[in-house]
Amino acid sequence: MKEHIAILTFDGFNELDSLIAYGMLSRISLLGDTDWRVSIASPTPRVTSMNGLTIDTHIDLHEANSADAVLIGSGMKTREVGNDASIMGQIKLDSQKQLIVSQCSGTFLMAKLGLIGKTPACTDTTSKPWVQAAGVNVLNQAFYANGNIATAGGCLSAQYVSAWLILRLRGLEQATEALRYFAPVGEKDEYVNRALTHIGGARV
């Protein structure tokens, strides 16, 4: 079954959010799954990170709207993006048909898109005040999922975001394999079990 994951990435993006997820999620295609596709999606052909890294993007926001799963990354210009009607108007997501997950300040964009509602959510400590100001009940934890919506807080929670998407789309075995592959040597069992506990998968 073909699956496409789009990672929404804007100017000023946090490299850890977008690129850790991109690397971990791409593990599935590296193992030979030709039906698995991961794309960096942006309103422009190129975006520059908060630390000056410029990358070419794969698809625009319109194509991301038809992806099976969408990850909304964070960055130092997230509030500007959230207040830019020309950008936000291009994002049309549907949690009935898609898996939608945000990381850190990406939760602010998810709230602005009306995807969270009264569901509690996670974000990073820096973004917390203005995510709360957007009406979100922020949890003091790294990851939370409810149905097809998930949120994460902290740059290194990218591992939980990625594992959750793989778990939902490809199952426990492949989620576990990806986590184990990337886990530090000597800590693999501990690392995998902690991640699976966070995302609601079985311990191994």
Image (spheres, helix red, strand yellow):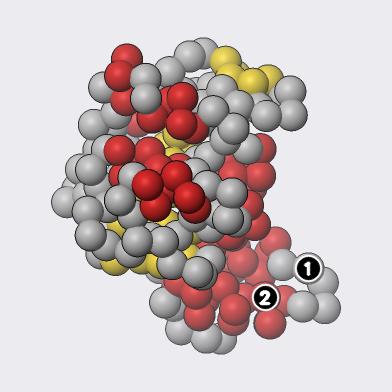
Say if residue 163 shows up in the picture: no
Residue 129 in the image: x percent, y percent? Answer: 48, 50
Q: CA distance from mark 2 to mark 1?
A: 8 Å
User: Which structural element holds mark 2?
Assistant: helix
Residue 26 in the image: x percent, y percent? Answer: 56, 46
Relative to residue 156, is residue 8 depicted above or below? Answer: above
In the image, taking residue 153 as reference, residue 92 lies left or right, namely left
In the image, taking residue 117 as reference, residue 2 lies left or right, namely right
Under mark 2, the amino acid is Tyr
Which label is found at residue 24?
none
Q: Residue furthest left?
A: 96
Q: Residue furthest right?
A: 186
In the image, taking residue 93 as reference, residue 45 lies left or right, namely right
Which label is found at residue 184?
1
Point out the image quarter for the C terminus.
bottom right
Residue 130 in the image: x percent, y percent? Answer: 45, 44
Residue 55 in the image: x percent, y percent? Answer: 64, 22
Q: Quadrant of residue 121?
A: bottom left
Q: Nearer the viewer, residue 139 or 174?
A: 139
Disc with the residue nearer the chain's start (2 vs 1): 1
Say if residue 177 shows up in the picture: yes
In the image, taking residue 18 as reference, residue 111 lies left or right, namely left
Under mark 1, the amino acid is Pro
Is the residue marked by circle 2 packed among few (<14), some (14-19), or many (20+) residues within 10 Å?
some
Q: Quadrant of residue 54?
A: top right
Q: Residue at x 34, y 45 (%)?
A: 134
Relative to residue 51, is residue 105 depicted above or below? Answer: below
Q: Residue at x 72, y 76 (%)?
A: 188
* Residue contact between numbered discs 2 and 1, judged by CB atoms under 8 Å: yes
- For mark 2, what is the residue? 191
User: Which structural element holds mark 1?
Assistant: loop
Is the residue marked by circle 1 packed among few (<14), some (14-19), or many (20+) residues within 10 Å?
few
